[in-house]
Amino acid sequence: MTTSFLLRELLRPSFFKTDRVGWVLPRLRAYGAADASTRLRAYDLWAPLNGLGVHAELYRPFLRYGTVVFQKCFAPEHLRLAKALKRDGVRVLLDINVNYLELDEQFVPRSHHEDMKRMLAAVDGLIVASDHLARAYAAAFTGPIFMVEDPLKLADFPRPKTHAGKGTRLLYCGYAVKAAELELITPVLRRLHARHGLTLVFVCDKDPRFSAIPAEFHPYRQDGLARLLSLGDVKLAPRDLSRPYNLGHSAAMIAGPMAAGLPVAASPVPSYRGTPASLCETEAQWEETLERLILDPALRAELGARGREHAARHWDAPVIA
């Protein structure tokens, strides 16, 4: 499901209907190589949306659309296209899962910040991935804001993790650059390793080269994600919440592991509240939570089952569509 996905989308018959919805993407990549946000908030939604009678597809400039969604793209060329579409009477929406209103040296340079402000002035409405983002953008945007969480494809996780014995393999799955936030709990991991012989399993785009405790690296593969996640016993999701950028994250970081039947230990990101994730604010809470999960396979199985049920009820792509 690589280049064939895009070829199918580009060649799919399309009729001249004004209820057609087209997606403009930040970059055109095959399904397996697409950015996570593009895969989740465009590619994975088109089939279930079409099943509901919404004519959803990749934007093609030679066709007529009633609505065009700009998926996390707001560079000058996207702004020009948005303005041209609006002149033609097309409804223009911006779908965004990151807070670009907060400057962040690593993830939100000033150029992105300024481009976003100009794009906000041009669109008819926003689609955001969390309630926190909805509140953040409401301070700068007076139009309608719709909260639509990141979806997942539960069908990609046919069998939940089987939990038995001590859970000594902790999992980190995500972009390698963000694995640096494991430093927030490195002292905890070292103490637990001394007591239980932990291993960290990384499923990332590249090796994050974490050396605090023994670790193994597996390259991220979307088509084999369920198998990769099952290599771990507990999913770790620490975040530095002193950075406003991190407060706006969606629940995507924990949704896949929950669908795979893993218990999750995480920082209290606003979008994680109300889920079965075990939220930890202090070192003591992290250590106590992880110790219990390591030693108690029944607890891991219970939280894993609750997480999978929550994922099916709230995040499965047909539900989000």
Image: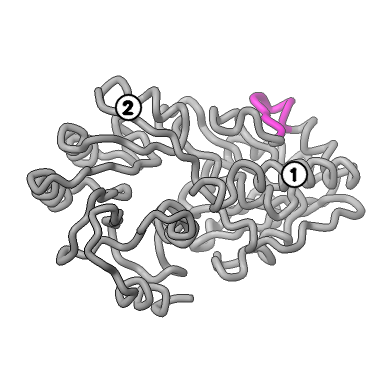
Secondary structure under the numbered disc 1 in the rendered image: loop
Q: Is residue 110 visible?
A: no
Pinpoint residue 190: horizontal percent, then vertical percent.
72, 42
Q: Which residue reaches farthest top? A: 139
Q: Is residue 273 left or right of residue 47?
A: right
Read off the residue under disc 1: 263
How many tags in the picture?
2
Write the start and end of the magenta stretch as one range. Answer: 278-286
- Three-letter amino acid code of the residue under disc 2: Tyr
Read off the residue under disc 2: 137
Secondary structure under the numbered disc 2 in the rendered image: helix
Instruction: Estimate how packed mark 1 is, as few (under 14), some (14 to 19) or many (20 or more) residues with alpha carbons within 10 Å.
Output: many
Q: Residue at x 45, y 27 (%)?
A: 132
Q: Residue at x 22, y 35 (%)?
A: 124
Classify residue 20 by image quadrant: bottom left
Going from the N terminus, do you reach mark 2 or mark 1 first?
Answer: 2
Using the numbered discs, state the Cα–Cα distance from disc 2 to disc 1 in whole angstroms: 32 Å
